[in-house]
Each structure stands twice: as C-alpha cells, then as structure tokens.
Image (cartoon, rainbow, N blue to C red):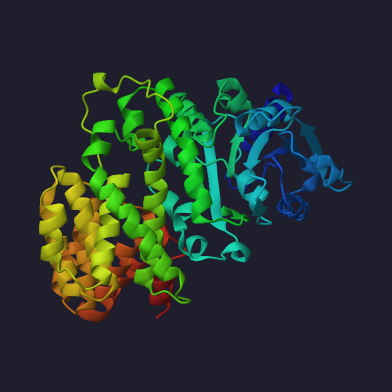
Amino acid sequence: MECFLLQYYIYRLEYHSKTDTGGNMEQPMPYNPTVSVVIPTYNPDGVLARLIEQLKRQTYRVDLMEVIIVDDCSSTPVYESISPDEFLNVKIIRHETNRGRAAARNTGIENAKNELLIFLDSDVIADENLVLTHATQFDPFKKILYFGTFRWHSEVKNNHFTRFGRWFEYDCVLDKPDLDFIDFHGANFSVASSVLKESGVVFEEQFTRYGMEDLEFGLLLKNQGFVFAFLPDAVVWHHRIATLEEQIRRARSSAYSILYFMEKHPKEKVFRSLHYLSGDIFEKYSPVLRSAQDCAQRLLQDIEKIDQPTLFEQEIVAACGIFLIEYAPWEELYVTKSEPLSVDFEKFSFAPELKNTAVEWAFRVHFLDRIRRGEDSAKKIYNAFIEPLPDIYLRQSLCHEAGRYFILIGREIEAIRILTIGSRHVTEPTKELYLINYLLGSTLKKRGEAQEAQQFFKYVIDNGKKYIHASQYASALYHMGDLYANYIHESKQAQIYFERALSINPNHKAAQLALLN
C-alpha cells in the first residue's frame, strides 16, 4: 500500500511542476488508480455471470482491475459457474461456512490489493462507465466515500411494486445536502483502500440477520470524519425478481438487526436517524397502524388488477408498499416479541419525531384511501386526522402529503387549502415548509396566478437551498424563470434563472428547452 501512495504522490509532484510557456498549469493527465471490485455473493443466479461480462466491457482499463468474488458458502460453489478469465483478473474466495454479507465484504477488503475499492452486490448489472466514474474521483488522501446510482433493471419491473417502487432506487434521492450514515447502501460505493484500511473500520460480522451491517459501517466511517458524496453517473441496475411479500419478510427479519444496532450505539442521534418507535408510541398509534395495514393490503389488491394505473394510483402503490415495509419490523418487535428489548430507552428523554415513521405512513395510507373514494375534503381530513396530533412537525408533514395527493387528482383548491394550513404550523425552517411553498407556487402558477406564485418560489429560492434536494431547488429556479418568460415577459431575468437551474441540475430538461427557446 505504501508504494501505491508513493506512486500517487510522485504523480502529483510531477503534474504540479509542469507549466506551459505562459506560466499557467497544463491540463492534468488523468491518474488511473488500480481498482479492486469486491462482490460478496450467496447462491447467486445468472445475474452474477452477466455482471462479470459487463465488467469486462468497462471503458476503464481492464488491466488495472481485479474482481474479487467472495462466495459465502453457496450450495453450489461459484467457481463451478464462474471460470477464471484471460481478459479480466477474477479471483474467487470461498467461505467454508456461511458467515453473512458483513464477513464476505471484510474478506474482500482483506484480499484486495489495489488502490481503489468498489463494492457491488452480486444481483446488479453495471453500466459500462461505472468503474471509470468511480476511478475519476480517486484520491488516496481524502476521507470520502462515493455512492453510485442504483435503479431497478427494466427486465424485472414485472409488477406494480417494482415498477413504481422508487424507494428502492438511489438516484435524485441522494442529491440532498449532508448525506449521513442512514443514506449508506452497499450495492454500489467506492472508497480509497488506503484511507479505509488506515481507519480500521470493518463490517460488523455479528449482524447475521438481514440488514443494518451497511448502515453501521457508514456510521463508524462518519464518526472517523469521512464524508459521503453521490455520483449520479456511476450506475448499476438491480436485477432481482422482487415482491412486496419478500421485502416485508426481510423487514421483519431486520427488526433484530435494528435492535442489535441500537444496543451498540445507544445515542439520541442514532435513534432519531433510524426513526425509532418506542413501545409506548407503537401502542398509542396501534389502532391507526393496524387499520392502515388492512387498508393498504386492500388498496394494493385493487390496483394490481389495473394495467395502467394513473399517477395517483402509482402513488398509492408506493405509499402502501413503504408503509407495510416500515411497519413490519415494529410489528415483529412489539407484537411477535420473540426476543426481549434489552436497550434501556427510558434514560433518553428526547421526544421522538414521527415524520417518516410507520406512523406517518399509516396516516398517508388513510388519506389516499379517502381521497381516492372522493369522501373527504381537505377540511374533513385535517379535522379528523391531522389537527388532533400533538406533534406539530408531523402535522405539517401530513398537510404537505395531503396537498400532494389532492394535486395528483386535480383538486387544486383543496390542495391550496390544506397546504396553506400546513405552512402555518411550523414557521421555522424545515424541509416540509419549503416543499409546501414550492407546491403552493406550482399550483398557483398552473392556475395562472403568476404574481402569487412568484412570491412562493422566491421564498423557496431565497431560503430553502440547504433544506431540499438539489433537483427540487433547481425546479423552483426553473419555475421562477418560466414566470419571468411567459407571464412577466422579462427574458433576461428568465435566462438568469434557467442558467442557475442548469448549474445545479445540468439534466433539467425543461430548463434546457427553455434556454433554447
């Protein structure tokens, strides 16, 4: 490892010593690090072979790559289906007993010889530019870890759950500011081998049930001062036949990994990040959770019969799926309760936030059901469900979601009513406050009320950049530019906003088209 760092250091010195005749720095020649691609696997199907074939086709220099497949004691040894390759350096290491994904990744780290580590799951197919995109960011001196994009493969979007389940895709969702350990995923990430090994951080091998070993790995790195960054162009496609029932089973199993995680890291920040639900909270909202469970299952059965669901029905599929998955581990802990809760949570006096927990998703399911049936106005939904809640942040978040649902079915007046109420619940800066103002602006703009819409977009642009995703902020800039172009008729001001939108999101198609016009 020391020779790699010395080689890179000499490269840096040589580059910085070169100047052109005018005294300016020459355009740097790219440094191409050697790469170890680590792939843990257990009983893989044909996708692993397709992944290896795709790694051969990388735009990166294959002679600088090694692929380490860690076979975690598969029933049929991987070496029987994946043969050594003349073109690509493939190493297969087999565990004699099944030790879990954490141990498999650690084995990969131990046996990796190269400068950059790229971790992939064995059920993904890599874009041909994947390795090059990760390698371009290489710096052996920086404590930084890069996530790539993770999407469902088009071949496996075989049901509504996978077709509309964007919660399993890491794309624009990771353009938010300040990525934390809760955003970590093990399917597609890279880190310099030298800084990782110097940190001493490894995957915790006691996580033998499903989940959490990757989140703890991220937490340990964060505690060591590592920074997380998102590489949208480093793409893999998830190629696994997935069902909601299977994911619920995984979530139930993850309950015990969550418990073990919290026992190891009994800190308020961790509990908040995990959206921890204590037993008393779970019991308090148990009627809402149970009724939402029945409601979600009924809605999913109804919509599964529809070949081309509307955008609103797609939202129902996504929300119901998320609720059932989020609800599963807490139901396992507090209803099945096959293992005791050994963490002493009573010594922590913080009030848990209920945003983005199974509780909030339960309310969303009820909203979607009632709005779909056309039974409730914004006022009825607010009075029956939202106003009685003691958590003002949850009330604001639910107003935002209910507003979104009314917009999707074209009931704009109802959307404006409930969004306006939500904007008054919490006036201090929150993500939901700026999203509410964004929705109010876009709804009023659609109705032709340009002056009022401009005020809401200006509020988001002036204050909300560090609270909402970059893609959402870019859209606010685009809408402001569009107002100037088509309502206020100030083309120069419009151009400024379109250019700002593209500086944040270069792929914003509407802003691109607007500039051309």
Camera-side residue of 300 and 14:
300
**Residue 486 picture quarter:** bottom left
- Whether residue 460 is visible here, answered yes or no, is no
**Left or right of 96 in this view: 385:** left
- Whether residue 48 is visible here, answered yes or no, is yes
- Please give the name of the residue rendered at 68% of the width and 41% of the height, measured from the top-left corner: 31
Camera-side residue of 178 and 478:
178
Q: Is residue 239 above or below residue 355?
A: below
Camera-side residue of 216 and 33:
216
Q: Position of residue 343 (x, y in %)?
A: 35, 21
**Left or right of 379 in this view: 179:** right
Q: Position of residue 516 (x, y in %)?
A: 43, 78
Q: Is residue 224 above or below residue 73?
A: above
- Please give the name of the residue rendered at 73% of the width and 49% of the height, measured from the top-left corner: 48
**Residue 233 picture quarter:** bottom right
- Please give the name of the residue rendered at 25% of the width and 37% of the height, measured from the top-left corner: 283
Q: Position of residue 55 (x, y in %)?
A: 74, 51
Q: Position of residue 167 (x, y in %)?
A: 44, 54
Camera-side residue of 506 and 493:
506
